[in-house]
Amino acid sequence: MNPEPVVRAEMLIRKPVEEVFEAFIDPAITTKFWFTKSSGKLAAGKHVRWEWEMYGAADNIFVEQIEPNKRIVILSSDGTKVEWMFTSRSAAETFVTITNSGFTGSNDDIVNLAIDSMGGYTMVLCGLKALLEHNIMLNLVADKAPDAHVS
């Protein structure tokens, strides 16, 4: 596939950049809107395991880079790269851009993975927005496929 797809999901979060950035670094916050369990906080050069216990799914990620309040780059176990960019718009607004690239497989596989990634990261940003701006846990990830939950 030429060019290979790069997924981009973006959202304005009406909270200071420090708070938005920390929501992705600290699993005590991230587990309220994305995965259910983590082996620890993100730090450059660190391997971290994320789990979605309701689906019996997990990913072992490597934290490639962290620039506090600006950027996070991880490599997923499937070889894809995810980058978060945090742009402070004001003292109380942050624009978050998530890009995901490096999909592999057949052309059909790549397209399906990119579409799934776009939907997933959009849900993550919506869940983050609800949590930080309104202190509401929407349970978007858990409710996306309730029939797929592990019993």
Image (cartoon, grey):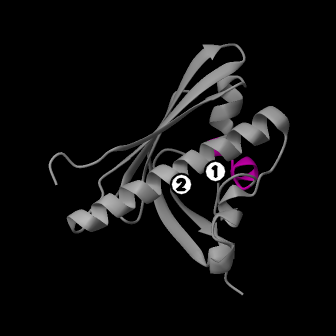
In this picture, residue 142 sits left or right of residue 79: right
Looking at this rendering, what residue extends furthest in the right direction? 135
Q: Which residue is mark 1?
A: 41
Looking at this rendering, what residue extends furthest in the top direction? 90
Location of residue 134 (image quadrant)? top right
Specify which label sits upstream in the sequence, 1 or 2.
1
Q: Viewer-proximal residue, 149 or 79?
A: 149
Q: Residue at x 55, y 71 (%)?
A: 58
Q: Is residue 29 magenta?
A: yes
Looking at this rendering, what residue extends furthest in the bottom direction? 151
Rate crowding at label 1 as few (under 14), some (14 to 19) or many (20 or more) other CA atoms within 10 Å.
Answer: some
In what element is the residue under mark 2? Answer: helix
Q: Residue at x 67, y 33 (%)?
A: 20
Location of residue 149 (image quadrant)? bottom right
Q: Which quadrant is home to the C terminus?
A: bottom right
Rate crowding at label 2 as few (under 14), some (14 to 19) or many (20 or more) other CA atoms within 10 Å.
Answer: some
Which residue type carries mark 2? Answer: Gly
Q: Is residue 79 magenta?
A: no
Q: Nearer the viewer, mark 1 or mark 2?
A: 2
In what element is the residue under mark 1? Answer: loop
Question: What secondary structure is the stretch in magenta mostly built from?
Answer: helix
In this picture, residue 32 sits left or right of residue 48: right
Q: Viewer-proximal residue, 87 or 111?
A: 111
Q: Position of residue 110 (x, y in %)?
A: 29, 61
Q: Position of residue 4 (x, y in %)?
A: 22, 49
Which residue type carries mark 1? Answer: Lys
Q: Viewer-proximal residue, 124 or 25?
A: 124
Q: Position of residue 9 (x, y in %)?
A: 48, 40
Q: Which residue is mark 2?
A: 120
Q: In the rendered structure, which segment of residues is drawn in magenta? A: 24-31
